[in-house]
Amino acid sequence: MFAAYATTRGRALVDRELYLPKSWTQDRERCRAARIPDERTFATKGDLARDMILRALDSPLPMAWVTADSAYGQDSHFRHFLEGARLSYVVAVPKSQQVHGPRIDHLIAQAPPEAWQRLSAGPGAKGERFYNWAAARLPACRGGVRRPRGDPAAVGAGAPQHR
């Protein structure tokens, strides 16, 4: 796993963690053969991401936003950690994600067509990455949702925080 820092001037990898599944951490001989220290125990990807974010917050890097894919977005503990750290975030969530009752895809379906705005998420390997965005006040947080153009199964949710 990697933590990257991005600005309008560029991007850089600033931290990393090795995710080890339980099958590895429970097999101490395998870990020793791979030179993984005995004190290394199982940690979820969300736990490792949280540790990297805490290290970034303790560093001199100015940090106000976190972005993450659905592996982290669907983890309510990770989202609550970000909110508790007063970090704004945009995370992908599966369309079946529930937000205090309704599924996120049901909330998206309620947005009128004029609520959607097409914005760039910056250049990608295949050119500019455009997504359709609509802001919505969600029961769990103040934020918005994003739907990638051409992929109605993938959505994102975010909670802007004011520092």
Image: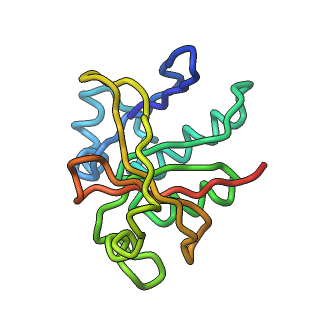
**Total marks drawn?**
0
Residue at position x 62%, y 49% in the image: 88
Which residue: 54% across, 47% down? 50
Residue 161, horizontal then vertical, whole percent: 69, 54
Camera-side residue: 94 or 145? 145
Percent of width and height locating residue 9: 57, 14
**Image coords of residue 163 (percent x, y):** 78, 48
Picture coordinates of residue 118, whole percent (x, y): 41, 45
Nearest the eye: 9 or 66: 9
Relative placement, left or right, of 33 versus 162 is left
At a point 29% along the width and 42% down the height, the residue shown is: 28
Residue at image position (64%, 59%) is: 83
Q: Which quarter shows the N terminus?
A: top left
On screen, residue 46 above or below 115? above
Residue 43 visible in rendering:
no
Q: Which residue lies furthest to the right in this view?
A: 163
Q: Residue furthest top?
A: 9
Q: Nearer the viewer, residue 96 or 57?
A: 96
